Structures are given as C-alpha cells and as structure tokens.
Amino acid sequence: MFRKQGVFAADNAGTKTMKGEVMKRSVFLIVACCMMLMFTMSAFAEKGPVETVVEGCKTEMQTYCKDVTMGEGRMLACLYAHEDKLSGRCTYAIYDAASQLEHAAVALKHAANECKADLKKYCADVKPGEGRLLNCIDRHDKQVSSKCKQALKDVGLKK
C-alpha cells in the first residue's frame, strides 16, 4: 500500500504525500526568506518575484488576505495559511518567484566568489547591505580585477 522512495509516498487513495508537503513548505520558506533579495536583483527578470506573486495571486490576496498589512512576509504567511484554496495560477506564480529568487541567489554567490579578493582588499571595513559593497567596488573600479568586473556584468549589477 505504501511505497518507500526516500520520503513517504502516497497510498492508492490519493492522500497528500509527505514529499509534496515538504516541497510546498520549502517553496514558501524560500520565498519568505528571500523577499528582500528581489528588490536588489530585479535585473534578472522583466517582472521581479514580488510582481510575479502579486499578479499571479491577485484574486487570492483580495479574497483571503485583504486585511493583511504588507511587509515582513505577512502576505506570504497569509497565502500559506490558505494554500489549500490557491488557484493553479497563484501556485505557479509562487513557484516562479522562488525560481527567480534562486537564480538571483546563485548569481550573487557567483559575483561574491569572483570579487572575494577585491572585497577583502578594498572594502574590508565596509558594512554589507544597502548597496554599500557594490558602491565600494565602484569607487575602486580602476583597481578591481577583471574577473570581478566581468562577474558583476554577468549578473546585471554593472554595465
């Protein structure tokens, strides 16, 4: 009746799988944890993750979350609380936003790795956040390595 495939599988009656629940929770967690990242990485998509979710989940947000104050992941928490009522369009929008955020995180990791030596050499005393490290790299543009410059171009942080 039950098959073991790394995680519990569904029975023949079609009950939700543990794997599916873990996946849904993981996606919501990824989106919630990365909400601030989308403001700085909108260059990766015509529509950023926030716009994707707002557009795709507009009906659900108006129906179930109209009294929720935006910010600090409250809207995602509301959508998560009503996940059993979400349309396919909304569910897809959330997965799409998570994918955009994952892409942005990988791109930032690439840029950070390529610029690690330059950041250490020129920006060691700069507090991370709010674009301060990128501004520091810009101030030292003539000294920054070509691999760092190229990585920043590759991820859309520099022209």
Image (cartoon, rainbow, N blue to C red):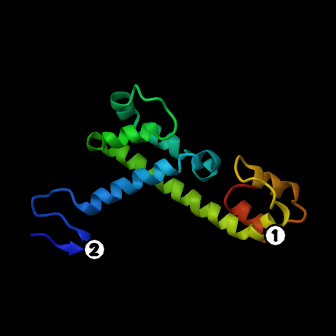
The percent position of residue 76, horizontal first and vertical second, equals 42, 41
Observer-nearest residue: 127 or 115?
A: 127
Q: Distance between the residues labelled 2 and 1?
A: 45 Å
Residue drawn at point x = 78 percent, y = 70 percent: 117
Please name the residue that numbered disc 2 is placed on: 6
Residue density around tag 2, few if under 14, some if 14–19, many if 20 or more, within 10 Å: few
The percent position of residue 10, horizontal first and vertical second, equals 17, 63
The percent position of residue 83, horizontal first and vertical second, equals 30, 43
Q: In this view, does 155 lie to the left or right of 117?
A: left
Classify mark 2: helix, strand or loop.
loop
**In the image, what residue type sits under mark 2?**
Gly
Please name the residue that numbered disc 1 is placed on: 146
The percent position of residue 42, horizontal first and vertical second, equals 61, 47
Residue drawn at point x = 45 percent, y = 42 percent: 53
Question: Residue lying furthest right in this view?
Answer: 142
Instruction: Confirm whether residue 159 shows in the render.
Output: no
